Structure formats: structure tokens, C-alpha cells
Amino acid sequence: MVHLDIKPLSLNNAYRGRRFTTKELAKFHADVAKLLPRDLILPATDHGKLAVRYVFAVSSKNSDGDNLIKVFQDALAERYGFNDKRIYDWHVTKVDVPRGKEYIEFEIGPYQEISTAPDLQRSERSANIKQRSKATK
């Protein structure tokens, strides 16, 4: 996993209204571009589906995790020259840290489609849960 010592920027601080980016966003993109590894190679072709894992360590418990995703993801896409519409799978974690210790970690790799075949274990678990709930009534 790639670790970046940078405070995540929320979507609320990145844009004013619908059309105008902020100076904070431009600085964040520039700072992220400097910190990102130059040798990162994206999997598959230019059209391959991707999966990402993000860890956002924030000092404010009020930080809205999904607001952090788009700003950072756009910075990644800009730096590595891919369209973020290729991302089909997101795994996101938010971690509380003291002020001044904020960071972002990420992994990016090929998307693995999950089989839609019936899952016997899931069916068995569901049946067990139903049986237990009937027993407790």
C-alpha cells in the first residue's frame, strides 16, 4: 500500500459552488503529485477495470469519508493519466489520528469480478439465522 503524508482534502473545501475550484484544491493536487511514486504502473490496458483501496487518516471526527474520495481520486487520475470511470470497486477506511498526523494510503489494481453463482455458504448462514430467530420468539 502506498502511504502519503498529507492531510486529505474534502470535497467541501475543494469546490465553491458547482463550477469553481479553490486554491486549496490546486495546492492539494500539486502536493499529491509530488508525493506520488513515479514508478507506479497501472494494471491492464488503458481500458481495464480497476479496484482501489483508500485509507484516509483524519484529525476531525466530522470528516465525511465519501467527500475525501473524489478529491484524492481525481488527483490520482490526473497524475497517472487514467479516467476514474475505470474504477469499479472501492474499499475505503477512515481512521482517526491526532491533528498534524493526517495521511492517505492507497492501492490500485485490477478489478476482479465476483461470481454471481449462488453461494451455498451464504444460503446456509441465512437459513441458520432464520432458525435462530424463530427459536428466540
Image (tube, helix red, strand yellow):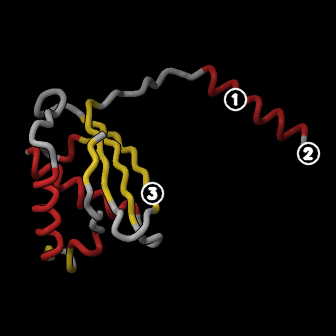
Q: Choose mark 2 or mark 3, whichever is in front.
A: 3
Residue 41 is situated, as x and y percent measured from the top left of the image, at 14, 33
Near mark 1 (Cα within 10 A), the count class, few <14, some 14-19 or many ≥20, is few
How many angstroms separate mark 1 from mark 3 (CA)? 31 Å
Amino acid type shown at disc 3 = Val
Which secondary structure lies at badge 1?
A: helix
How many angstroms separate mark 2 from mark 3 (CA)? 39 Å
Residue positioned 34% across, 62% down in the render? 102
Which secondary structure lies at badge 3?
A: strand
Which secondary structure lies at badge 2?
A: loop
Classify residue 133 as left or right of residue 5. Answer: right
Residue positioned 15% across, 37% down in the render? 40
- Position of residue 74 relative to residue 136, above or below, is below
Q: Quadrant of the N terminus?
A: top left
**Contact flag, marks 1 and 3 (Cβ < 8 Å):** no
Amino acid type shown at disc 1 = Arg
Residue 32 is situated, as x and y percent measured from the top left of the image, at 16, 57
Which residue is labeled 2 in the image?
137
Residue 68, located in which quarter of the rendered image? bottom left
Q: Choose mark 1 or mark 2, whichever is in front.
A: 1
How many angstroms separate mark 1 from mark 2 (CA)? 19 Å
Q: Choose mark 1 or mark 3, whichever is in front.
A: 3
Name the N-terminal-most of marks 1 and 3. Answer: 3
**Contact flag, marks 2 and 3 (Cβ < 8 Å):** no
- Position of residue 7 relative to residue 125, above or below, is below
Residue 104 is situated, as x and y percent measured from the top left of the image, at 31, 54
Residue 86 is situated, as x and y percent measured from the top left of the image, at 21, 40
Question: Who is closer to the viewer here, 113 or 53?
Answer: 53
Which residue is labeled 1 in the image?
125
Which residue is labeled 3 in the image?
95
